């Protein structure tokens, strides 16, 4: 019985999509791989056929949230990872996630996520300010791999989002039945989703192994939204929800220093 599904919400014709698919097929623990898109093309269809992947087209108006929610709806297992089409997963990603969750059958794991490395020009980046900031925010996990208390789960997310979205595996069996990514956000939707999940009964599990290579390139959505200011705008909105307008502006400015590492 398969325990895990990768869903890939492909967007347009990414030159990195095939490398992502190959890394998913190379997992030591096999599972389902589903390819979805709201921008169908012969390129994407050919990859689905070449690698014999389940393939679905989302006919709804395209946004990151609707694309991700549609992809999640096509998963056939409780454990689901939204694989970002530009990224590469180490062969032991799924096996490590499943093993660590199975060690904790009573903890009601909501999400499990690993550490990651930035991939720039096909080279793994060493030090980055962004990575340093995120490691500081993840400090509560230094005492325990899993956090169950809503206070500690929210504390990890109160000064920014240190959770790398493509490194996250959602446990849909533990998440609320109506879980979805909010269409109110186009960049910080994952941070907002984790904050909502933090209020629910269950644990966040962090595995401090770099099992994902997160690609940074000039055409990536992250780079685009930092360049046009959309990411900073959405992050400020979330900081204001947490801290109020006065303090939020200060925290947002400090947190934004880490964005420089995502510019090419």
Image: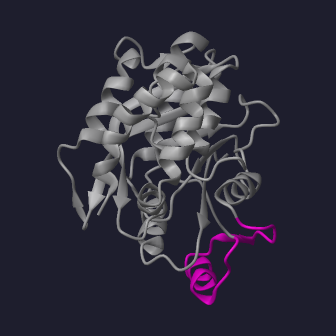
150 lies above or below 27? above
Residue sitting at 37 percent across and 40 percent down? 256
Q: Is residue 74 magenta?
A: no
> Where is residue 41 drawn, in percent x and y?
64, 85
> Where is residue 193 drawn, in percent x and y?
64, 36
Residues 182 and 50: in front is: 182
Residue sitting at 56 percent across and 80 percent down? 47
247 lies above or below 114? above
Residue sitting at 35 percent across and 19 percent down? 139
The answer to whether residue 37 is visible is: yes
- Would you say 39 lies left or right of 84 here? right
Residue extending farthest to the bottom is: 42
> Where is residue 141 drawn, in percent x and y?
40, 18
Q: Is residue 59 magenta?
A: yes
- Would you say 153 lies left or right of 63 here? left
> Where is residue 13 drawn, in percent x and y?
53, 80
203 lies above or below 42? above
Magenta region, residue range: 38-62
Residue sitting at 34 percent across and 16 percent down? 142
- Would you say 180 lies left or right of 35 here? right
Residue extending farthest to the left is: 126
The C terminus appears in which quarter of the rendering? bottom left
Residue extending farthest to the front is: 246
């Amino acid at each position: 019985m398969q325990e895990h599904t990768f869903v890939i919400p492909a967007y347009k014709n990414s030159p990195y999509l095939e490398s992502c698919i190959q890394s998913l097929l190379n997992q030591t623990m096999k599972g389902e791989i589903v390819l979805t898109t709201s921008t169908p093309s012969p390129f994407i269809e050919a990859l689905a056929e070449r690698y014999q992947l389940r393939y679905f087209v989302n006919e709804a108006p395209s946004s990151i949230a609707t694309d991700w929610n549609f992809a999640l709806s096509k998963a056939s297992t409780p454990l689901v990872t939204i694989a970002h089409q530009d990224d590469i997963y180490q062969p032991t990603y799924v096996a490590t996630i499943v093993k660590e969750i199975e060690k904790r059958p009573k903890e009601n794991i909501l999400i499990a996520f690993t550490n990651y490395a930035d991939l720039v020009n096909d080279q793994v980046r060493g030090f980055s300010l962004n990575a340093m900031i995120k490691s500081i925010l993840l400090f509560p996990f230094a005492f325990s791999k899993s956090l169950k208390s809503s206070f500690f789960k929210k504390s990890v997310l109160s000064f920014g989002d240190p959770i790398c979205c493509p490194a996250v595996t959602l446990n849909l069996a533990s998440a609320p039945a109506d879980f979805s990514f909010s269409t109110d956000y186009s960049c910080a939707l994952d941070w907002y989703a984790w904050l909502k999940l933090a209020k629910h009964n269950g644990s966040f599990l962090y595995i401090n192994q770099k099992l994902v290579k997160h690609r940074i390139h000039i055409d990536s959505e992250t780079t685009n939204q930092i360049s046009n200011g959309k990411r900073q705008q959405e992050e400020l909105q979330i900081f204001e929800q947490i801290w109020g307008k006065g303090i939020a502006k200060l925290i947002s400015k400090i947190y934004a220093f880490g964005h420089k590492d995502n510019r090419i």
